[in-house]
Amino acid sequence: MTMSLSNIQLSKKKCWICGYKKIVQSEISSLPYICSWCSNEHVVTLISNIVSEAKELLRGGELDKCEDIDVLSFVADLGTFGANHSYFKQFSRIMSMMAVQIALQHKYTPERLLKVTDGSSPQERWERVLDCIKFLMDVELLEQGQGKYIYELYKPSDLFLTLTTSVEIADVEKELPPRTAACLAGYAWLRGIAITINWLKEGAKGDAKGIMRLYAKGKDGKLSVPKSFTAPIMYILGHLAGGHNEFSETEFRTWLNPRGILGKDADFLTNILARATQLNHRLVNFIYRGSTLHFKFNPLYLRMRERYRERRR
Amino acid sequence: MAKGGRCIICGDRIAIGLQLCDWCRDPKFEDVLRGLIEEVDSELKQASRIDVKANPTFSLIADLGILGTRHPLLASFSKMIAVLITEGGKGIREFKARDLYYGQRDVKPFLMMLHDLGLVVYDATQEEVMIPDDSVLLKIKHELEADPHRNPAAAFALGYATLKSILKTLELARQRLVEYGEGVTCLYSITRNGSGSVRMTMPKSYMATLSFVLGSWAREFTEFSELDLHKFMIDRGVMGKEFKEVLAILSCAFATAHGLYERASVEHLGRIAIHRFRLSEDYIRLYERIRARQRTR
């Protein structure tokens, strides 16, 4: 049931985006590596629309307006989830550091990136920096170049250079403002998710692509899905793409259950949505409904979705 | 009577000494219900017939009434209303109360309720029932004559009576203990067992559904799923086949179709398929109109 992909082992029994555990044989054979929720056409279309529009805005140097523009604000909200994930937050820091260095010096240096990377040894930290660089190549924020230094081999793409112009304007010296950093990371991760979905749907052949490059690897080479980051994002995207405006805590927990997110982990994610933690996002507003919570999507994001649907019609 | 144990509107378990649960006690619930009743009453004064297909206010009341038409505890009341509407339409305005009995159920409390609401005039001493000229029942008959095909106007009477009595119950509960025969308790039945203790039976699957729909509407929830409904119902002791019946009524699986939800779909949530409902746009607008009027007062 497993197959070897370079150094990684992928099981067909689970979704490599949200962590859904398949128990029915027909699910495994019809859609290996991914679940029906994540591979849903509406979800893929919504992600593609968001990524395209965000890309255009970033190319136009609008990164600093991520509070005002609905698409960038949505992307920043999704990025906030990753920026607070115990493992993924280091990649958010790497991207943020890279953006600052590129804005100020037009290059990035491994020394500075290693400083913001977690890991028990320099070797491990360096591998994570390399994973992030490869991921940024996938999402076209870096591109292949020539030279003997790493910033020459993997040089910033035009898009990355353009979006850092707004960082220069912000007069940033050390690090990006959290919301701007979350927007940049959110864009990269969303694009990475789209690439990975496509790769998984095509049979997961060759090296892992997109966001899977950033997944934590165990000593035995097995990847672990960062469910507490990807699952809530996919739920929100899937629910929004499905044309729904509201959802309840009960539904959210029921959805998380087959992804193996239960108990305190599910409480934690619910608390994030209910803004009971320090995490700042505008994805949903909540109303207390007796013993549970009821969430309503931000009207700005509903209008954004309707705009995409209208264009498609 | 009604000292505690269960909410007298939806049947939720509550502490001794209370009469209403948190859901029904919420001021939003009463405000929106009052707003709706005022809206209906003002439109009833002007309307010569209950046009439930064109008027969203009448339509909402009828749709809520439809939720109770299949309940066995309310079957005799539904039949009685049907007789009053059809016979009243033929010009027969006076009835003997004993002729309105269908089955074992005592209809006197219900007749008193209809009397209080002005739908009929009930003389308890003479056991006579009379339909006044300005009764809503006659307006319903006019509507049924105008459009007899699958018209839910008859359910309007049950919905209207229930909602008005819920509002009266909420008002009474704020002041004192609600007694049997007051407010919505007229829809309930009481029996005395061998030991002499009194047991009240309420049509929970109707009242709890009504409370859920109204409460969700009052809180501006426009969407909900089977899971939310299940959680709500299970607290009120509605489960198993009874819950499936409620779900079937809400998803219009029976011939008595209503227009409460513009979208009732089955969605896959993880491994399970669940029903999801979205409130009709007409009723969302009606809610906004009612709230706007309440704010301007």
Image: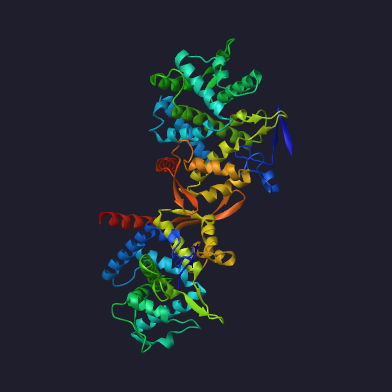
Is B135 on the left or on the right of A280, as rendered? left
Q: Where is the C terminus of chain A found, in terms of image quarters?
A: top left
Image coordinates of residue A310 in percent, x first then y, are 42, 43
Q: Is residue A83 left or right of residue B63?
A: right
B130 relative to B203, above or below: below
Pick the quarter of the image with the N terminus of chain A: top right
- Residue B257, can we see it? no
Front residue of B69/B210: it is B210
Task: Answer left or right for B95 relative to A140.
Answer: left
Vertical side of B156 occupied by A235: above or below: above
Quadrant assignment, res B100: bottom left
Check the image and name the residue furthest to the top: A148
**Percent x, y of residue B71:** 50, 72
Residue A147 appearing in the image: yes
Give percent across and percent down for residue A85: 56, 33
User: Residue visible at 44% across and 58% down?
Assistant: B22
Q: Is residue A176 above or below residue B137?
A: above
Q: Residue B16: give x, y in percent of width and height.
A: 48, 65
* Rendered residue at 65%/23% (across/down): A120
